[in-house]
């Protein structure tokens, strides 16, 4: 087909690197290769049994019709209760909008607040879709670089230095995808003080990995009263409740932003799945401290983190820190740039990931997709046995490079 028919907006849009590597891994697997895919951000656990039962009950009770655009009132109330119980945040149901995954929640916000030319500050490494969403909404991206020496966390000073008269928002995640880094209360407080001096700037706080936290208490950006009207909290059930396929995310935001997102969503997707919403009510009303399934998942991820970090530290030329949450490690691999093996020349992280995938059949994601070319992302959302085998293969592939 003649690609002239495709819009420039779409042609200029970068493909999601995580989904691209996952698709390449699936293709090699279909060809008969023993592929280990550590490229996708999905818990390898099943949805908790009580949540699945709630979905079955919803079907039996005929929750199969159109839903309110912003979500069932019962679910919005459940979000409010969860935010009070777990985060000590006060919201009303009218400030909550339920969407088809946290990804749509973020896209809604970008379209709701950005005008052409507005700037959004994005600390890197960042989740792959943040820049694309800003661009699609007509905004401009201002990157703030961080590195492994600071656990990939930006500072309040870096934030303040990046602000211009066009700055409309800053977006970041904690726990972070791709680094697993978690911001402390003191770090967020310093960022809040910068926001307090700049009341025209929103902070979009992506907290989708909230429950996968090995440090203890999760700190929410909206806890600082002086800036609460500037905070848009993003969350959902995909990661912490192993509900990726259910596609439920939400925002808690200033009322004007929530109403704008409701208005937008009403024009292009309407309300999220009725059955998934009813299951999410059950998930959110379950206290994380009382769910043995959730506690077991977090314990398992913590153990896997220690395993992978330990194994990576045994590989010459790889530099890694110890992430505090999520289920990723983001090691520096640039010591291998410029090296070769047979027909492969490693110029960057993308070359390295493709080399490892095609020679040892381990799927990883290059760091340039996250704004950090010197690194790669490794997901440890799989069993210890598979992780051990994957690192053995990675080590073998790297040892061949000269």
Image (cartoon, rainbow, N blue to C red):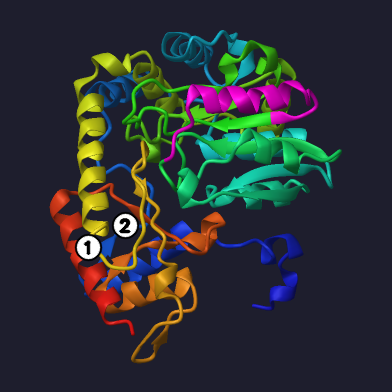
Q: Is residue 201 magenta?
A: yes
Question: SS at mark 1?
Answer: helix
- Judged from this view, the residue extending furthest toward the left is 385
Q: Is residue 250 left or right of residue 46?
A: right
Image x and y of residue 274, in percent: 46, 26
Which residue in the structure is indicated by mark 1?
A: 390
Please determine whether, in this image, residue 89 is positioned above or below residue 44: above
- Between residues 309 and 135, which one lies in front from this camera angle? 309
Q: Is residue 339 left or right of residue 109?
A: left
Which residue in the structure is indicated by mark 2?
A: 38
The part of the chain drawn in magenta is 181-202
Q: Residue at x 23, y 25 (%)?
A: 295
Q: Residues within 10 Å of mark 2 (few under 14, many from 20)?
A: many
Q: Residues within 10 Å of mark 1 (few under 14, many from 20)?
A: many
Question: SS at mark 2?
Answer: loop
Marks 1 and 2, Cα distance to the nearest angstrom?
8 Å
Image x and y of residue 90, in percent: 56, 8
**Earlier along the polypeptide chain: callout 1 or callout 2?**
2
Residues at marks 1 and 2 touching, judged by CB atoms closer than 8 Å: yes
Q: Is residue 307 left or right of residue 21?
A: left
């Amino acid at each position: 087909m003649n690609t002239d028919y495709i819009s420039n907006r779409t042609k200029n849009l970068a493909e999601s690197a995580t989904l691209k590597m996952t698709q390449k891994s699936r293709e090699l697997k279909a060809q008969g290769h023993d592929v280990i895919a550590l490229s996708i951000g999905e818990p390898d656990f099943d949805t908790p049994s009580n949540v699945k039962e709630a979905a079955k009950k919803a079907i039996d009770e005929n929750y199969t019709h159109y839903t309110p655009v912003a979500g069932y009132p019962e679910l919005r109330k459940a979000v409010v209760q969860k935010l009070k119980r777990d985060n000590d945040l006060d919201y009303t149901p009218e400030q909550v909008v339920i969407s088809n995954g946290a990804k749509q929640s973020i896209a809604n916000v970008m379209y709701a607040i950005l005008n052409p030319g507005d700037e959004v500050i994005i600390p890197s490494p960042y989740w792959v879709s943040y820049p694309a969403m800003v661009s699609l909404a007509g905004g401009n991206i201002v990157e703030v670089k961080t590195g492994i020496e600071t656990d990939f966390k930006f500072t309040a000073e870096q934030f303040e230095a990046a602000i211009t008269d066009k700055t409309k928002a800053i977006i970041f995640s904690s726990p972070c995808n791709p680094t697993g880094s978690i911001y402390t209360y003191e770090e967020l407080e310093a960022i809040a003080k910068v926001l307090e001096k700049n009341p025209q700037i929103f902070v979009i706080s992506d907290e989708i990995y909230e429950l996968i936290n090995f440090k203890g208490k999760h700190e929410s950006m909206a806890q600082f009263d002086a800036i609460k009207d500037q905070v848009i909290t993003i969350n959902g059930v995909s990661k912490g409740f192993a509900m990726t396929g259910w596609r439920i995310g939400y925002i808690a935001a200033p009322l004007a932003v929530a109403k704008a997102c409701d208005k937008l969503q009403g024009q292009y997707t309407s309300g999220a799945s009725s059955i998934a919403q009813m299951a999410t009510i059950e998930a959110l009303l379950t206290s994380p401290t009382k769910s043995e399934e959730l506690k077991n998942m977090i314990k398992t991820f913590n153990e896997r983190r220690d395993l992978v970090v330990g194994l990576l530290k045994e590989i010459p030329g790889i530099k890694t820190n110890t992430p505090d949450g999520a289920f990723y490690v983001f090691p520096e691999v640039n010591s291998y740039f410029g090296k070769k093996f047979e027909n492969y020349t490693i110029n960057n992280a993308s070359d390295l990931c493709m080399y490892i995938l095609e020679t040892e059949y381990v799927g990883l994601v290059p760091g340039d997709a996250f704004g950090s070319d010197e690194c790669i992302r490794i997901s440890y959302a799989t069993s210890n046995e598979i992780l051990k085998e994957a690192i053995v293969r990675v080590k073998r592939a790297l040892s061949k490079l000269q």
